[in-house]
């Protein structure tokens, strides 16, 4: 089927560039209602994603010598026979637009070696979801004072073939093991009985999920939540860890994004200081890294044919380079870095335990579970509900939940201190603890 | 070829497969989903046209007396479907559990519906869609000196759905149209983005909503450039219809999805028949609401759509069910079994969820506030059905002083609190009702489905920051 599509695209002289991605997916899914099996699912799918480019002289008055018309569309495997007709429609669609000229990605080196496909999952997805369910149940049985409310496991295998008009081609396999579970802690909490902790995960291999440790942490959190109270209101130093790290750097990533620059979502220029690091704070160094073994953000070839790489975006708080796929790299005349890979942040020098010490006479909050924590990529502002944390003072830690924490990424990062310990999460590799000064808490 | 298979033929083929599966398992069903549409976007920097050619898939379901097993495929050839359905039936038949109550497949019915649509999206040309988007974009770009990027989006989606079980053969054609604006403004080193628009069930007769709102949208975006952060604390809050909708969705929408009851993950289960909101508060989930983006005739498990009153005068009366949880809890089915796609499981999901209108004029509600905030432009929210906490975020909190809007705008704003405390503090309900269809909803962090949310203006007490 793929060859039929490629032949048609190659032999159509109205098309100046094209790419086709064939995506074959097999998914095995297991759902638990408490400890009982609620259902199992298998999914098999095949899809083709096509993009065509038609470059022509710019229309009069457009101010452009050349323009590119483009269209992206999907082809159902059963509709390959109709592809000629769909291609005509796509060409008509493409000619309705006249964007700044760009071309398909050129051949640019050797496809990198990066581990993406777990042989255990490829060989026995059914066995992997069953194993995960057993591991989860065993971990919950070991934990004190909690029970399993629900769980889901997805073992996905992908086979991707990429071809474009410039000769780039690549075949690679990848896997994802994702899921979630929810624990309930029993006790006489203020809200009358039980409290829940929900955890979601996504890794390339089951072995990297660490269900045992996740359950132990979640169980501890569930139990502590029963006695948790609202935090105080005011400005406090806050240490974040866990899920908050996944999106904490979204503002600097938007500032570095080629697409955001081209679409005027950021005014930042290369060389600009995004963060003015204060004395004692950790200098900010951020990479887009698509080459971390087994990381979910890793890839060999991105969605437009660029090879995976590691690119320093932020150096010492300054915008060093753009993260840009092939199209935006051409527009901005910078080297393509490919789609955003994993966010790699260089660690600090202090141990986490040091960061978790309160300043004399003032409590510190260690917050590690939120409703949803993602700073606004454009403004850098963030506000989120606190699901769980601890108020730490000279007398020790006390659990808190509820209320919210707010701040501004630029200010928060200027005084941030990063731990020496690092953590690899779904798409994040960086400090395990980040201490932020003077965030605004709204609670009691 | 899938594309050559009409919906009638697909229905017949699925019926044959289901009949075959029923020889081996106590219950079987099949759902076919086919989607087709277009998305056109024009911005200050680029334009894009994305034709969505028809894509189709089928999910077969088999019940073993205790659990549901499913096989999904987009190989719609006779052989492909036979392989998927037989494989699933064989697998399930090897795991039968006897003794449980039988599943109720519902009354026998064979019917087909089409959502009313005056201007068929599939009959409007790409050029017409592009021209409309270009005009809107040009107006938006010219509406303010600080506009850095103006984007107009026009899109449509036509979904053909076929459901077959041992006694039902149902088909529906649902169409939806989107018209949206997004503006980026910047001045003195600050950048802000704001958006507005509609997503409505039906066709291109709905276009025209955005154009009159352009000056207001740009003026509001420019006002955000000088916004300040709000001083955190408990305060009186007035919400516009979109914010009320987010509250409906996050507070009591997710909290009454009965698959969460079954897993003891929603406090709503303990409160059925009890007071959860003030006596002037009522909330519906209604997949029959005419012209809305989440309106349909049957859900993805074959339950026929009907209005579902969730809260009546402050009392929690009904939950929203999927097939599995309704069966195990002994609840009547409501049409809330929905899937993100044929590749995903059905869960209990909201449709069109909204607070019912009350008696107060919105202007009177504002006038009644001595000191508080008027919330507009919601952005996102997150549910916590078990803890009954709530997080709703937005971009606009305008100070009210002495019953008047002051023009002092704070942004962003986050509303948090304990759901029953918030809902029981509702002391004024507007006589207006608007429903926004722009949103999508996830179950936790995934399973994204289209739904709408709305309500009248509401006044209550909550914690803002």
Image (tube, coloured by chain):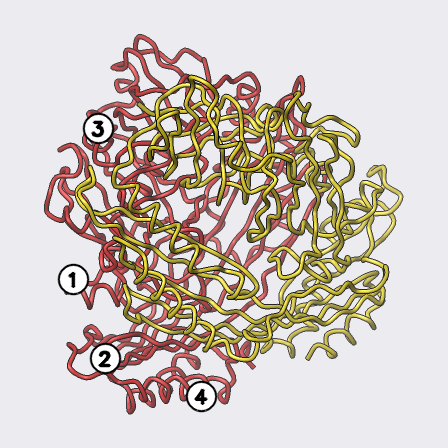
Tell whether label 1 touches label 3 (CB within 8 Å): no
Pair 1/4: label in front? 1
The alpha-carbon separation of the residues under discs 3 and 1 comes to 29 Å
The alpha-carbon separation of the residues under discs 2 and 1 comes to 18 Å
Q: Secondary structure at mark 3?
A: loop
For the residue pair A14 and A180, the one nearer the viewer reads as A180
A412 in relation to B103, above or below: above
The alpha-carbon separation of the residues under discs 4 and 2 comes to 23 Å
Disc 4 and disc 3 on one polypeptide chain: yes
Q: Which mark is residue B82?
A: 4
Q: Secondary structure at mark 1?
A: loop
Mark 4 vs mark 3: which is more N-terminal?
4
Mark 3 vs mark 1: which is more N-terminal?
1
Q: Is residue B106 left or right of residue B150?
A: left
Mark 3 lies on residue: B426
Name the chain under label 4.
Answer: B
Mark 1 lies on residue: B331
Q: Residues within 10 Å of mark 2 (few under 14, many from 20)?
A: some
Q: Secondary structure at mark 2?
A: loop
Q: Position of residue A416 (x, y in %)?
A: 59, 28
Q: Position of residue B88 (x, y in %)?
A: 39, 84
Mark 2 lies on residue: B65
Name the chain under label 1.
Answer: B
The alpha-carbon separation of the residues under discs 1 and 4 comes to 34 Å
Pair 4/2: label in front? 2
Q: Tell me the residue at 81%/66% (across/down).
A: A168
Chain A colour? Answer: yellow
Q: Position of residue A210 (x, y in %)?
A: 48, 59
Q: Secondary structure at mark 4?
A: helix
Name the chain under label 3.
Answer: B
B266 in relation to A266, above or below: below
A88 in relation to A263, above or below: below
């Amino acid at each position: 089927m793929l060859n039929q599509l490629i032949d048609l695209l190659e032999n159509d002289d109205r098309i100046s560039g094209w790419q086709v991605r064939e995506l074959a997916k097999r998914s095995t899914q297991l759902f638990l209602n408490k400890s009982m099996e609620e259902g199992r699912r298998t999914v098999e799918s095949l899809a083709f994603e096509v993009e065509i480019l038609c470059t022509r002289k710019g229309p009069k008055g457009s101010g452009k010598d050349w323009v590119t018309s483009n269209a992206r569309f999907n082809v159902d495997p059963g509709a390959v026979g109709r592809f000629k007709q769909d291609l005509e429609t796509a060409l008509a669609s493409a000619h309705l637009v006249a964007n700044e000229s760009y071309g398909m990605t050129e051949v640019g080196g050797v496809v990198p070696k990066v581990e993406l496909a777990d042989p255990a999952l490829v060989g026995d997805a059914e066995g992997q979801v069953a194993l995960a369910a057993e591991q989860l149940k065993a971990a919950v049985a070991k934990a004190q004072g909690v029970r399993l409310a629900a769980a889901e496991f997805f073992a996905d295998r992908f086979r991707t073939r990429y071809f474009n008009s410039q000769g780039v081609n690549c075949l690679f396999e990848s896997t994802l093991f994702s899921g979630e579970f929810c624990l309930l802690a029993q006790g006489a909490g203020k809200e009358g009985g039980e409290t829940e902790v929900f955890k979601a995960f996504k890794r390339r291999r089951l072995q990297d999920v660490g269900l045992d440790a996740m359950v132990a942490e979640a169980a501890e959190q569930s139990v502590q939540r029963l006695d948790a109270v609202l935090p105080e209101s005011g400005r406090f130093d806050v240490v974040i860890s866990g899920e908050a790290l996944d999106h904490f750097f979204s503002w600097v990533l938007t500032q570095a994004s080629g697409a955001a620059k081209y679409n005027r979502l950021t005014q930042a220029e290369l060389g600009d200081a995004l963060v003015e690091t204060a004395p004692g704070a950790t200098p900010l160094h951020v990479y887009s890294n698509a080459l971390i073994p087994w990381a979910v953000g890793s890839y060999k070839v991105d969605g437009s044919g660029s090879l995976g790489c590691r690119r320093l975006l932020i150096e010492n708080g300054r915008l060093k380079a753009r993260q840009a796929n092939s199209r935006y790299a051409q527009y901005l005349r910078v080297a393509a870095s490919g789609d955003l890979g994993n966010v790699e942040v260089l660690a600090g020098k202090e141990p986490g335990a040091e960061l978790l010490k309160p300043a004399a006479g003032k409590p510190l909050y260690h917050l590690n579970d939120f409703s949803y924590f993602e700073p606004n990529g454009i403004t850098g502002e963030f506000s989120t509900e606190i699901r769980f944390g601890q108020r730490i003072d000279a007398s020790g830690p006390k659990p808190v939940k509820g209320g919210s924490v707010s701040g501004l990424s630029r200010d928060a990062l200027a005084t941030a201190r990063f731990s020496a310990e690092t953590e690899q999460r779904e798409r994040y590799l960086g400090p395990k603890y980040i201490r932020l000064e003077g965030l605004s808490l709204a609670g009691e | 070829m899938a594309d050559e298979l009409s919906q009638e033929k697909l229905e017949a083929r699925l019926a044959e497969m289901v009949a075959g599966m029923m020889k081996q398992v106590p219950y079987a069903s099949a759902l076919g989903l086919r989607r087709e549409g277009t998305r056109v976007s024009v911005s200050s920097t680029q334009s894009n046209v994305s034709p969505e050619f028809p894509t189709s898939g089928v999910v077969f379901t088999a019940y073993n007396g205790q659990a549901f097993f499913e096989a999904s495929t987009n190989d719609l050839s006779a052989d492909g479907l036979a392989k998927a359905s037989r494989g699933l039936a064989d697998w399930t038949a090897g795991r039968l559990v006897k003794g449980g109550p039988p599943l109720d497949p519902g009354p026998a019915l064979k019917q087909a519906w089409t959502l009313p649509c005056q201007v068929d999206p599939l009959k409007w040309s790409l050029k017409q869609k592009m021209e409309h988007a270009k005009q809107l974009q040009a107006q938006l770009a010219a509406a303010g000196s600080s506009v850095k990027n103006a984007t107009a989006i026009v899109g449509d989606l036509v979904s053909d759905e076929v459901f077959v079980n041992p006694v039902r053969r149902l088909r529906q054609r649902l169409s939806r149209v989107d018209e949206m604006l997004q503006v980026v403004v910047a001045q003195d080193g600050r950048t802000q983005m704001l958006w507005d628009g509609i997503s409505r069930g039906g066709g291109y007769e709905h276009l025209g909503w955005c154009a009159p709102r352009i000056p207001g949208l740009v003026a509001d975006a420019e006002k955000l450039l000088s916004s300040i952060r709000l001083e955190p604390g408990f305060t009186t809050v007035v919400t516009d219809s979109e914010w009320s909708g987010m509250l409906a969705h996050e507070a009591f929408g997710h909290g009454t999805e009965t698959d969460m009851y079954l897993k003891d993950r929603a406090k709503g289960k303990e409160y059925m028949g009890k007071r959860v909101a003030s006596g002037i508060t009522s909330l519906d989930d209604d997949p029959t609401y005419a012209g809305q983006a989440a309106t349909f005739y049957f859900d993805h498990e074959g339950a026929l759509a009907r209005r579902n009153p969730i809260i009546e005068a402050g009392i929690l009366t009904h939950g929203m069910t999927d097939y599995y949880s309704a069966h195990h809890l002994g609840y009547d089915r409501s049409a809330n079994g929905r899937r993100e796609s044929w590749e995903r499981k059905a869960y209990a999901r909201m449709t069109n969820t909204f607070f019912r209108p009350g008696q107060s004029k919105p202007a009177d509600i504002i006038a009644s506030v001595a000191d508080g905030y008027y919330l507009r432009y919601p952005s996102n929210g997150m549910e916590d059905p078990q803890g009954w906490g709530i997080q709703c975020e937005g971009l606009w909190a305008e100070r009210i002083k002495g019953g008047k809007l002051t023009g002092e705008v704070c942004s962003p704003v986050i509303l948090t609190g304990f759901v029953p405390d918030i809902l029981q503090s509702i002391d004024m309900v507007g006589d207006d009702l608007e429903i926004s269809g722009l949103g999508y909803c996830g179950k936790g962090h995934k399973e994204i489905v289209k739904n709408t949310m709305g309500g009248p203006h509401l006044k209550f007490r909550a914690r803002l920051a």
